[in-house]
Amino acid sequence: MPEIILIQISGEDKPGLTSSLTEVLAGYNIDILDIGQSVIHNQLVLGVLIRLPREAESAPVLKDLMFKGYELGVNVKFKPIESDRYKEWVDAQGKPRHIITLVGNKTTGRLISKVSDIIAENGLNIDFIHRLSGRIPMNGEPAPRHACVEFSARGTPLDPDLMRARILTMATEEQVDIALQEDNAFRRNRRLVAFDMDSTLIQAEVIDELAKAAGSGEVVSRITEAAMRGEIDFQESLRQRLATLKGLDEAVMEDIAKTLPITEGAERLISNLKKFGYKTAIISGGFTYFGKKLQKHLGVDYIYANELEIIDGKLTGNVIGDIVDGPKKAELLTEIAKKEKISLQQVIAVGDGANDLPMLSIAGLGIAFHAKPKVRQDARQSISHFGLDSILYLVGLRDRETD
């Protein structure tokens, strides 16, 4: 077998360093089997796995590399690789990979230790760790709003359900958000993000606001909470709530629309999604009147919601057409994906209620956003402590790439 050697180079980074070292290898016509480099605070760690030709001797090339390293002011070490170990490395190339994204107020040793422990106990090997959030200044200037670290791990979790449960527990205990995704071609090519509206894109349940104006606020609020927890069928709960709005003046909706609070990070998220060519959609069990105003404000591409019936300027307590409930949301998401000619695996769906679970379950990335415990438990991913713009980290974008 040809001799296989791992070259390990460390020291201060400088322009032309990699070029100079690999020029030595080029002079001996040496094949590079693998190469990886990282730089932290201008300190370089470079690994190069080489194969020497059968007829070559290792001494001359290693001697020249050592001399070149001395000239460049870096450390150069060599490690022979056994043929069996190399074969194991080659055989491992088909293993699944996963991305674990940690979002917190700051990065601490405790957080990194806990996440890496969860990764290790599930039989995964960490290949890379990257910081996606901005650098932290020490001169009193404002720090980045979030601290985000992304882990790339190789292997199949020994118990995926247990791993997810451990992640949820840690996220709750440490007040952080953690996402576990399979790293595949679809994950790197998401093209559509669909949002629920009430308590997702806006920090309100519009029907509760309408009910307050109609004098039925407490009754409707109780029904809404039960529906979001999945205790009442959504269609039946909507009919019960709408019945209390009969006779409400249409003008009330305009007043409510002016005061609806947009969720933290929504505008930044959607503006950046548009910048990178994503399509966006609102698929809501709320109402088109408010959804269209939000669509115009945020620049959303699609809007599907329930249309309130209005006769002579008054709400009748009914909707026009089919009710947009959980199954309908999944159906509409599928229709949009087909129209955009993309796979559902390229779709991100975001919602907070039980009626969002059908569309969260069919999307490649389904995110329960500040959701009820049952929804968090059933959804594959959750964001519970930060704004909607933290989703940018889940698609792998760095702070320096976003506005």
Image: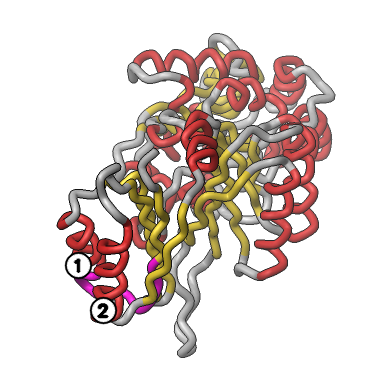
Q: Are marks 2 and 1 in contact (CB under 8 Å)?
A: yes
Q: Mark 1 highlights which residue?
A: 20
- The location of residue 312, given as percent across then percent down, is 52, 20
Q: Where is residue 91 shown, x and y percent of the image?
A: 51, 31
Q: Identify the disc placed on residue 7.
A: none
* SS under mark 1: helix
Residue at x 39% of width, y 60% of height: 7
Q: Residue furthest top?
A: 321
**Residue linked to disc 2:** 72
Residue 15 within the magenta-colored segment of the rendering: yes
Q: Residues within 10 Å of mark 2 (few under 14, many from 20)?
A: some
Looking at the image, residue 123 sits to the left or right of residue 52; the answer is right
The residue lying furthest to the left in this view is 27
The image quarter containing residue 27 is bottom left
Distance CA(mark 2)–CA(mark 1): 9 Å
Name the amino acid, label 2. Leu
Q: Position of residue 345 (x, y in %)?
A: 48, 24
The x and y percentages for residue 172 are: 77, 53
Q: Is residue 373 above or below residue 282?
A: below
The N terminus sits in image quarter? top left
Residue span colored magenta = 9-17
Residue 289 in view here:
no
Q: Dot 2 lies on which element?
A: helix
Would residue 317 appear left or right of 225 to someone viewing this image?
left
Residue 94 versus residue 112 in the image, above or below: above
User: Relative to the observer, which residue lies in front, 53 or 263?
Assistant: 53
Residue 191 lies in the magenta stretch: no
Total labels drawn: 2
